Image (tube, coloured by chain):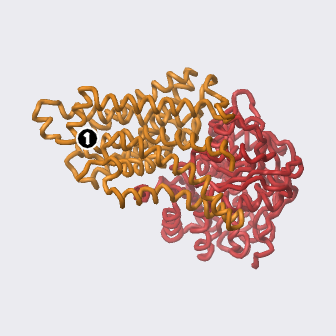
Amino acid sequence: MSTLLLAEQVLNGLQLGIMLFLMAAGLTLVFGVMGLINLAHGSLYMIGAFAAAAVAGATGSFLLALMAALAAAAAAGALVEMLVIRRLYDRDHLDQVLATFALILIFSEGTRWVFGSFPLYLNIPDYLAGPITLPGGIQYPLYRLTLIGIGLVIALGLFLLISRTRLGIQIRAGENDREMIAALGVDISKLYTIVFALGAALAGLAGALVGAIQSVQVGMGEPVLILAFVVIVIGGIGSIKGALVGAILVGLTDTLGGLLLPALFAQFMEASAAQGMGSALASMLIYILMAVVLVVRPTGLYGARA
Amino acid sequence: MTFKAFALAASVAALATGALAEGHGGVKVGMITTLSGGGAGLGIDVRDGFMLAVKQSGNTDIEVIIKDDQRKPEVAVRLADELIQSDKVDVMTGIIWSNLAMAVVPGAVAQGKFYLSPNAGPSALAGQGCHPNYFNVAWQNDNLHEAAGAYANSAGFVNSFILAPNYPAGQDALTGYKRQYRGELAGELFTTLGQTDYASEIAQIRASGADSVFFFLPGGMGISFLKQYADSGVDIPVIGPAFSFDQGILQAVGEAAIGVVNTSQWNKDIDNATNAAFVESFQAEYGRLPSLYASQGFDTANLLLSAMETASVTDADAFRAALKAADFESTRGDFAFGPNNHPIQDIYVREVIKEGDVFTNRIIGVALEDHADVYAAECKM
């Protein structure tokens, strides 16, 4: 196995991780601040992708499409928070899961009603298309590099937002003691709406960015949602830093596992069988990782100590 | 987090096409197909093709009850029980996915129902599990992949990289390709079912030194793969079965698909009067070009209608013989059933082109003529 292939795979793992981070950040904030399990987070990802595809189709501009994805997902998030989620904060997690699962079905069939059952077209803009040659002779798609860059900038922005701004202080305070900050005069319901819309916007952005290299179709958010849950469980619920580390860990494990395990099995078994065994085990790898993390640190890597 | 497992206990509205005529000759059809969720485009095409043929026939003796299986085997099994026991259907059809077909078909035919498959053709039902009441109007699963292997030989490819999802139809696909293909393998990969990111696989293809890539990634998986492949700068020629290049998804793939070679038993430019009329009337009725799935639904309905003309469904032996005769005008031209009730047909090589603003396919050759499946020999009936 060449080092070139390995280096390319590390980049791929990083890119997958960064996109997972955008999903997981919103999920972990919402869980950390509001104590809410939001299964409909994947639907917000889908809304972002569909909004981007629709606007890109109408205007031809990828930047406008990204703006539309952010705006549509944030608006959908704020609306959902005000109409549905707000009624769920005091209920137990099972009610939250049921209600947000219902939202998945409503969003999926609603999107099908508006856009039809066939996948939509969304492609990367010409100025980001094609591969570039990196130092060391690695050919790597420019668009994927851009995704890594955008993700890292957003991670930095979120970190600054949480640690340096007034809103960040309120969010952190809300995580620790929501009655107390309400008593101190912070408009808690407005804060919740803002946090929810922020998480939704990040999911929508991820959907639009990823939609351009994958397929924009109904139900695209749910597989990512499952991975995002794995990420926040590994990283520790409520922690942005945990989400970033967890996401990159999951991305690298998934990508490198899929490459290395079949190669490892091929050392001592027939090629076709090694492929089958290796890929089956590789697809379990991130869940094994999650189990190991939970055994060693039950609250996740950066989770609050009980 | 398998919350998707909370299956909704909802079934979709039944469409009745005209009142059932009094007396014998009436046929009740139960159609279970995928109308919601990720694979809905395929089921909708099969349904629309089927209903178009029923409508065009003007036959009022046929009643079709349509149910949505949501691509879930357990839902399909429940719907099948409902159709057989309370609706008392005579004929069943519609299932898209092989795993659902395996869950429903053996039970349905064992209860004396006829099953006409408009899509799924798992090897188990073509070989030892074949049944006189089970007819496949589309293909046996391996067929299009075998044709891709035959095409690779004729195109002079000797070092293919092959990949498919790690599930039964994916394994059948690679087996089918290798059955015809005579060259070396540069690599063989199983991906995860439903996978959307293929960066890792593409990197391995780039490093493998292959001269061709064969992939079977139906639906959204194929869209993702092709877009990412085009963007990666790897320019090794790609071959695949029609499932990643059907009319429904080509528009979402866009320019990335242009020139890609794929194999299919049907295309809209097959030159016969039935096909020309089908393509035109499908467009007029639904406002989109038909896919191969739509043609399969259309052919399935016409097969059923042809059998209804010569025999009554109450006389099972006569009806079975009438189905087996396949005395209908297929959109594919020549069509006949082999000994295991699976099609014997030509499989074509198509190329993706752009017609005006629409991405579509055109036939560039025949990969396999009068092709039957290899499992017929194992079928004892």
The image quarter in which residue B245 lies? top right
Residue farthest to the left, as pictured: A183
Q: Nearer the viewer, residue B285 or B78?
A: B78
Say left or right for B20 vs B162: left
SS assignment at label 1: helix
The image quarter in which residue B233 lies? top right
Q: Is residue B206 visible?
A: yes
Mark 1 crowdedness (10 Å alpha carbons): few <14, some 14-19, many ≥20: many
Q: Colour of chain A?
A: orange
Q: Nearer the viewer, residue A136 or B277?
A: A136
Residue at (81% x, 54% y) in the render: B149
Q: Colour of chain B?
A: red
Q: Is residue B130 above or below residue B327?
A: below
Residue at (74% x, 35% y) in the render: B258
Which quadrant, please, contains the C terminus of chain B?
bottom right
Residue A289: give x, y in percent of width and height: 45, 56
Residue farthest to the bottom, as pictured: B380
The amino acid type found where label 1 is placed reads Val
Residue A196: give x, y in percent of width and height: 31, 36
Residue at (54% x, 44% y) in the render: A13
The image quarter in which residue B7 lies? bottom left
**Chain that bears disc 1:** A
> What residue is shown with label 1?
A33
Which quadrant, please, contains the N terminus of chain B?
bottom left
